[in-house]
Amino acid sequence: MADSKRFDNYINGEWVAGSDYCANINPSELTDTIGNYAKADLAQVHAAIDAARAAFPAWSTSGIQARHDSLDKVGTEILARREELGTLLAREEGKTLPEAIGEVTRAGNIFKFFAGETLRLSGDYLPSVRPGVNVEVTREALGVVGLITPWNFPIAIPAWKIAPALAYGNCVVLKPADLVPGCAWALAEIISRAGFPAGVFNLVMGSGRVVGDALVQSPKVDGISFTGSVGVGRQIAVSCVSRQAKVQLEMGGKNPQIILDDADLKQAVELSVQSAFYSTGQRCTASSRFIVTAGIHDKFVEAVAERMKSIKVGHALKAGTDIGPVVSQAQLEQDMKYIDIGQSEGARLVSGGGLVTCDTEGYYLAPTLFADSEAAMRISREEIFGPVANVVRVADYEAALAMANDTEFGLSAGIATTSLKYANHFKRHSQAGMVMVNLPTAGVDYHVPFGGRKGSSYGSREQGRYAQEFYTVVKTAYVGS
Ligand SMILES: NC(=O)C1=CN([C@@H]2O[C@H](COP(=O)(O)OP(=O)(O)OC[C@H]3O[C@@H](n4cnc5c(N)ncnc54)[C@H](OP(=O)(O)O)[C@@H]3O)[C@@H](O)[C@H]2O)C=CC1
Ligand SMILES: O=C(O)CCC(=O)C(=O)O
């Protein structure tokens, strides 16, 4: 399956060779090279920014029908090619094929959603406090936006940044994660044929420290939307704020899943397994800490351990695989480090804890569960970003809520309960941006706001109509007679 295909950057409507190329390797099968993807040098990043700047005046004032049609065309093609693109995604990121096709479908739907949003742009028309004067409040495009995306959702996250950016009249420079350039390139190729003028959309691949940093530092970039780690996100925020660029960050989570005594045990086990282990735990919305009240604790741990026996770890493209490989050697080392930390902290290893041997050489890790852990342990407090979870026992709902909120993060949080009283209380008092009742902490819709509180997010929400907050600026016009 190895090939030597080369994939170039897309700048000002042209495919431009990189200064260097990076091999995109399949984490399910390390001998499978998906292709060689260009690395942009600094001159190319600046050329992409300049192209976007030059395209902005015309694009930001262009007709909404043309914008609608181009975005809709992108969505239609993504949906028509979902199996092929899903295969590429599973091959480069390691998500199972059904999960990957689901992500591609989400990306297609996002473009369709924002195609529709171009026709719903609205403002306010108000009487002024001064007689004979009227006030118009409208939204205009922000400008040139730099979009920096992570490896764990290689097509959906670029889609949910690119589609609103273009819908609201911005010009885009996309920098995808170096580990997974394939889906971003495929998306760029579709966009290149959808009727957008040259310079409106640009793709520059390469490392975050070079390409990403150049975007962040450029005074010609009006806003940065970033998804990734807390460390990088905070550096980006400091740089953007110091030059008064708009910034939006979506970062990590340590999402709690509460299980109360009155929960439906079977449902609680299933949603916990989904939250923690599916997508190899590589979702910022994954739950890696189960907070379980004393009356159900032992039954829950036993039932989750039993359920884990039937989870099939394997090649992402193989039928029957529940969990694909970890994305990279570095992420595998991080997961193994936390498994060691859990054991040295004194948590009890209930299931997993080691590598899995499959037919092909890849980064295969057994889903891992710890019990008898404490809230203060590092495995209870730090984001692992792999298929590793732990259980903490608490006395009652009040203790569970306090523990769930006792974290520097606040992305998503779940509760399993049959009590309306506790479900309602949790919805109101959870300090997370997204709250799930009797559902996994991971797995969200594409048409409603996405984002967290505290250390998980910064700036306005992504997705749905709320996305316009970041990609537009408000203008107030006073009109006399
Ligand atoms: N919330 C989420 O959705 C995600 C959270 N994470 C968290 O982040 C951890 C590490 O993952 P990782 O992919 O390394 O996340 P990073 O934050 O390193 O990467 C995210 C994006 O930022 C880019 N980048 C890296 N350094 C800079 C920089 N100095 N300036 C501008 N852009 C930069 C990366 O480029 P490149 O990769 O090419 O170097 C990538 O495109 C994970 O273990 C997890 O905890 C990771 C992915 C998604
Ligand atoms: O849970 C989801 O559906 C979205 C997760 C996500 O966006 C992420 O992990 O970055």
Image (tube, rainbow, N blue to C red):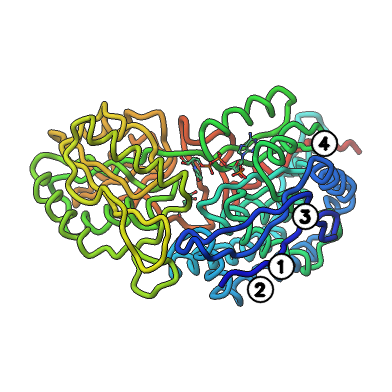
Answer few, some or many: residues within 10 Å of disc 3's Cα (few below 14, many 20 plus, some between 14 and 19).
Answer: many
Name the residue at 24% across, 49% down: 416
Residue 196 placement: quadrant: bottom right
Report whether 7 appears left or right of 251: right
**On the rendering, which quadrant does ligand 1 occupy?**
top right
Q: Is the Cβ of the residue at disc 4 closer than 8 Å to that at disc 2? A: no
Q: Residue 220, which numbered label?
A: 4
| Position in image of residue 345 (x %, y %) | 23, 30
| Position in image of residue 225 (x %, y %) | 64, 41
Q: Check disc 1 and report the residue beneath it.
A: 190
84 w.r.t. 140: above or below: below
Q: Earlier in the sequence, mark 1 or mark 4?
A: 1
Q: Check disc 3 and report the residue beneath it.
A: 201
Instruction: Give the quarter of the figure containing the C terminus.
Output: top right
- Distance, label 1 to label 3, CA atoms, is 11 Å
Answer few, some or many: residues within 10 Å of disc 1's Cα (few below 14, many 20 plus, some between 14 and 19).
Answer: some
Q: Is the Cβ of the residue at disc 1 closer than 8 Å to that at disc 2? A: yes
State yes or no: Cβ of the residue under disc 2 lies below 8 Å from any atom of ligand 2: no
- Distance, label 4 to label 2, CA atoms, is 32 Å
Q: Residue 77, which numbered label?
A: 2
Q: Is the Cβ of the residue at disc 1 closer than 8 Å to that at disc 3? A: no
